[in-house]
Amino acid sequence: MAVNDTDQSNRPHRDRQSGAKSAKKKSKKKQKQDAGGEDHKNQNPKAFAFSSSNKAKRLQSRAVEKEQRRLHAPIIDRSYGEPAPYVVVVQGPPQVGKSLLIKSLVKHYTKHNLPDVRGPITIVSGKQRRVQFVECPNDINGMIDAAKFADLALLLIDGSYGFEMETFEFLNILQVHGFPKVMGVLTHLDKFKDVKKLRKTKQRLKHRFWTEIYDGAKLFYLSGLIHGKYVKREVHNLARFISVMKFHPLSWRTTHPYVLADRFEDITPPEKVHANNKCDRKVTLYGYLRGCNLKKGNKVHIAGVGDYSLTGITVLPDPCPLPSAAKKKGLRDKEKLFYAPMSGLGDLLYDKDAVYININDHLVQFSNVDNENSAMTSKGKDRDVGEVLVKSLQNTKYSINEKLENSFISLFSEKPKVSSEALADAHGTNNDVEQNDAVIIGEDNNTKDLDGSESSDQDEEGTMKDSEASGSDEEDSPNSNALSGDHIQEHIEFHDGRRRRRAIFGNDNDQSDLMDSEGDEDGAASDDLASSDSESSEDEEDHNDNDDTNEDGMGNVSKWKESLAERTLSRKTPSLMQIVYGESTIDSITTDTENGNSGDEESDDDFFKPIEEVKKQNIRDGLNDDGVVNTEDCSKCTQFVHQRWDEEMIRNRFVSGNLAKAALRNALQTANTEEENDDVYGDFEDLETGEKHENYQTDDALAATKLKEDVSEAEERRLKKIALHAKFTVTTIYCYLNFLFTFDGDSGSAEEDSGKENGHKVHRGQPNESTYFDKLKEEIELQKQRNIAELNDLDEDTRLEIEGFRTGTYLRLEVNDVPCEMVEYFDPYHPILIGGVGIGEDNVGYMQTRLKRHRWHKKVLKTRDPIIVSVGWRRYQTTPVYAIEDSNGRHRMLKYTPEHMHCLAMFWGPLAPPNTGVVAVQNLSNNQATFRITATAVVLEFNHAARIVKKIKLVGYPCKIFKKTALIKDMFTSDLEVARFEGAAIRTVSGIRGQVKKVAKVEIGNQAQRKGGQIKEGIARCTFEDKILMSDIVFLRAWTQVEVPQFYNPLTTALQPRERTWKGMRTVAELRRENNLPVPVNKDSLYKKIERKPRKFNPLVIPKSLQASLPFASKPKDIPKRKKPLLEERRGRGVVMEPRERKVHALVQHLQLINSEKMKKRKLKEDKKRKELEAERAKDEQLSRKRRREERRVKYRAQDKQNKKIRRTEV
Amino acid sequence: MGKTAYKKLLGSQSFRQRLLLATLSSTPILIEDIRADETWPGLRNHEISLLRLFETVCDDCHVEINETGTKLKYKPGTIIGGRQHRAHDCGVSRSIGYFLEPLIVLCLFAKQPLTIRLKGITNDSKDPSVDTFKSTALPLLKRFGVPSEGLELKVESRGLPPNGGGEVLLSVPVVQSLTAVSWIDEGFVKKIRGITFSTRVSVQFENSMIKATRGIINPLVSDVHIFSDHRSGPQAGNSPGYGISLVAETTSGCFISADTAVSHSRDEDASSLADDAKRDLMPPEDVGVGTANALLGEIAQSGVVDSTHQGLLFLLCALCPQDVSKVRVGKLSPHGVETLRNIRDFLNLKFIIKPEPNSQSVFLKCIGYGMKNLSRKVS
């Protein structure tokens, strides 16, 4: 590094740590501290009291307002299970250190070095918390998807460079899709040489970050790298921040289930793929369920692929359980703290029917070499049981098929051993048939497999199935864990270049077999290893094969299991439910695409069959017979009863009756006591019906009602208590609500003292009673507790049926008919988001949104130019029509979006519920320099018709004018059109208003026809408020509907190589640019110089007949022309004076001047005189006024004296 | 878009609920074999009228019926509601109650509050009368969080079979979503209200009905008020008849009703009967006694609603947000069971049904569908 003068760092100033100066400073500081804050207030409280009541009122109202603004409408949280791992999305521009950050965090949590960050990485970060790290891809599609599932977004910013567009784009996307928590992380801070510069930069970036989010948003600084990793301490701090982060629910996500797939498998049958490489695939996706409960039959949207219905959903055991929930399964806890199948991290892989164990190569110590000196080691210390088992598994020689054939199972200890085949022959049970099936499949595998070297491998596959089938009895029972078997088999495969061992748990029988044959079989395993090593690439496919076949095998088994499960279910559910939801109606309803042909065929069949037979068949098929199918639709079924009701029977249902018994009945029901009690009581009552007993009864009644009330109240109280408790936990979470609850009278929690002052400050003068907000909150909490209580009552199957899969469970989703490109272009760097489609959201229609062009986007948007919108889970391209609402509610089309204003945008697409955020982009490519977000919007409503209009002006010309009626041509093209516009208002250019009346009669208007030409259509008779001129132009102003194109194109970015930009519909401008076409110019639209000829008016000609009838005065006179010109005409030439005349004229002028001067002087003099006079007069006036006042005073005094005298005399 | 996937259904059973649920869940349906084997095959007048009613309150819904009327294709649109200026003629084959039941639920989820005038038969013996609707169904709706302002049913004139001529004005507000209920306490009957009516007959009929009813009920509860509503002139519709509607209110706010109406039967029904049957109506005393006994029967079943309103109750429970609703009814009525099945078919929602042998009542539990009013505009 060259030494640079500018870069030279001076020795920094160091503060004095001791001495007089520092003491002075310290004391000053202390003083300052004392002066500020509450101490100061306490010293002189009066100084801080309100001096004006108005001000006090204002401040109070402001405080209340502020407080109200802080309140959020409480949302019920319907996730009852343990929460799914929180998703931490790490986002930033390329080369900013995203992967490194994840690696550092993973290292911090798990002490493992992560070679590569691919896909979501689940990590247990605390006793109660798991997090899932996802790296956000660098393209805009990936960013949009990531924003939809992020619970916390870590925005990485290159401190040495500053903010980049990606950060702001991502922030905008986040904002639209419900703004999860955001934390900024500054990296590359070691590039700064200058500390001051670094500090300044930090400050600057922090403030810019704050303006974007909120003041005080957390921005984290990672100072630099040590050994290629971030500083341990800083990573630790960051991890602390992440682990204490609170997440609030986002409205879209709490109403839609979604799964972020952390594992993806293609399970298409391989023969199908072989036959046609491009065939539709069957895939499974694994991930935690988030958002809300997922029901069976719910449709899903796979981002970038499309809408699919799930063919299968299975709950899998949590691969990364919380430490509290985890059962000890032999693996050390340290290793279990993470799960990332796509990154090759994590030890256990769960499937629907099997568990895979991943063991990294360097960890695998078991080998045959090891086996040889095992004797020595075994002497030294006891070998692990698992180790022994695994070793035993390595040494299998015979396939299990063979072994089973040879083996004997002792059913009873005394009985002779029975071979499995014999057993199968003897008992034709379901179980055995299944087993045979499984065996056959296993054999199929063998036959199919062409590669001889791997036959043993396949054999094992088959054997495993066998063992599972035989061990399935235990698996079926709900309590028995699939993993509880004490014997493990292993299946080694190479997948993505790493060893993967499949563990299957069999029962003791197999174990004994295997133990027997342990000694002889060394070769098989080694063979296995060798072959798999050599052909890792082929094995990839083979692995799939195995999976598939396994799937098939298990498919049978699972089906069979299902039926069993159903049976158990039906046994469990009460009979009434069975009656209501019996099988009778299930079959009659089938969802089917409308197909005319099949329907016809069916009807034909029916036609040629006797009706009895059809009915019988229907009954056989489980269909309802016609009698049921066509029952009358009537809700009333009360029979008219003529028998009198036994009063005693019903009396207790009335307030006048015996409340005791009635109450008892309820009480019994709620308290869940035995029936006997009631019976006894009933008998008792029957026997005794005396007066005395009445008394007793009433007492009893009271007691019983009390009991009942007590029970119900107790229940209510219990729920309330739970609710209150939960509320407090909520308060700790939402600290911004702290003061509200701590100020409740009954709150006695620990936060009281801390919250009280706070509360005092905010709630000055507020009564102690609970607010509306509290009530709302309490209600919601109560409902939640009730839900939990009710749901906990149910058994698992019923709960699943009515509630669906709970959030936080690890699911395996099976999807059929996925395009092969999804598998082909699958990229673990791009996480797959599977979002549940809500009610009616798969329908298509027009959506009206309130849209605003982003202020950083350079251009305005043009109507009908395609944009790519992201709404809900979906991304699609559509062509919006922009509009604005006029004051009368009309939606007027706009050609372009306004510059700085919201406008309406109407577009066609899959519907999203109102209030959903929309973000629009136009360009998806990565190499764009400018800001890619073009607009943000929110859905207002959706319609099945777009009602946008634009102005239209019809122009016509009069062809004949009567008095106030005129025939207008060229305005309409046909008579039909005229009929459409009857009564419409029209106007001429000169402002004469009128109305369209009717189509003109042919003979009047059509001069053309009179001349023998074509009849001209579309001439309208119109009336005006005045006579119009032939030169007038007539306008009709109307509104016409604008079509919104019914176009939407889902973005299938997952079905193409990720690095390629998705290409959709192009804008007209783009097309023109590409094809080098000029912008078409309408000649009429160009501005031209307006030429106006001077108007020539013809002389007024009065008709002869009219002239004749006029009075003489008005008649135009026929005046003969004069011979001699008039004086004026002659004078027109100008006058020239004679010299004498000129002299006279001058003299007169002089005289006049003198005179005027004299007059002026006189006027001035008079003015002066008048002013003097006026001044004198004013003086006099003043004097006289003074005098008068004096006189008046004397007079009044006298008068007053007189008055007083009179009064005195009167008194 | 490609082809629409229609849900295939058979027969004319629970036609109203199928239409209603199809519209609410926006599922296109295809109903086949509608009375295919009957002498008069196909859709009846009231069903056609119902379809027309759905078309008026919805936007862009698509109805296709084949020539014989045995096959119906229905593709729902958005529910608009709004103020309907033109009265809807319900015809005389079924009473207005038939139309009210689906309409009232449907229009809760409309874009704008509905106001509509329905013409036809206000009271008959087959469907719940408009009086019962007013006294029982509307409070039931309120229980589920429907605001009481804007929820109104006004009987402008009465009409009885066979000729009808009645008219009611219905207004239904819109809701964002309903609220789940936990409604298992049926309470004790504290008061009984009722209304009798007579059209084109003497007022004496009402008096004797009231007397007979009181004779049964008075020994059980003292707070009994039965109002009479005698109509004459144009308000009395086109045919004579009389009837009664009784409602029992319990201490926990449940309304249990029973009603009936007596009039000359419709032509189609009466074709087989002799003339004298047409002439004589059931005596009013018998009507009173019968209805009172029916009411007692409903009360004895100890549900929170009567058997007529079970369907409505289940529907509302199913349309709640995703919270647990718990209700208690007496014996499950066939209509209730039918409703449960339809809810399962359309909304993929099952109820937990638990019988309670002590009181012979049934407890039902469900988690709501999470229905939200999506068509309502946000400002």
Image: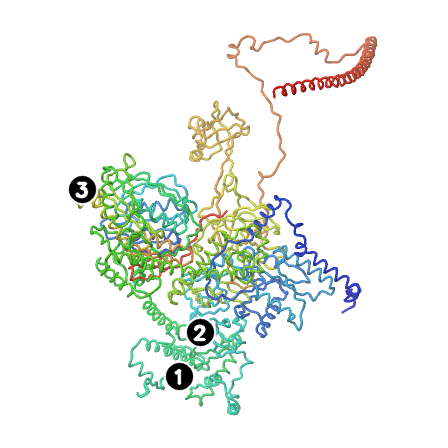
Q: Closest to the observer: A532 or A898?
A: A898
The numbered dot on residue A510 is: 1
Q: CA distance from mark 2 to mark 3?
A: 79 Å
Q: Quadrant of residue B49?
A: top left
Three-letter code for the amino acid on which mark 3 is drawn: Asp
Q: Which image quadrant: the N terminus of chain A?
A: bottom right
Residue occupied by mark 3: B280
Indicate the position of residue B125 as horizontal and vertical percent values: 25, 46
What is the secondary structure assignment of the residue under circle 1? helix
Is B369 situated above or below A284? Answer: above
Task: Please tell me whether mark 2 or mark 3 is closer to you in this view.
Answer: 3
Colour setting:
rainbow
Viewed as shown, does residue A20 lie left or right of A976?
Answer: right
Instruction: Confirm whether residue B46 shows in the render.
Output: no
Q: Residue at x 28, y 60 (%)?
A: A623
| Separation of residues labelled 3 and 1 (CA atoms) | 86 Å
Residue A1157 lies, with reference to residue A992, above or below; the image says above
Crowd around label 1: few <14 · some 14–19 · many ≥20 (10 Å): many
Q: Nearer the viewer, mark 1 or mark 2?
A: 1
The circle drawn on residue B80 is: none
- Asked whether, in this view, residue A217 is left or right of residue A526, the answer is right
Q: Which residue is mark 2?
A: A547
Residue A1209 % position (x, y): 63, 19
Q: Position of residue A100 (x, y in %)?
A: 62, 69
Which amino acid type is shown beneath numbered disc 1?
Answer: Asp
Which is more N-terminal, label 2 or label 1? 1
Q: Identify the image quadrant of the C terminus of chain A.
A: top right
| Same chain check for tags 3 and 1 | no
SS type, badge 2:
helix
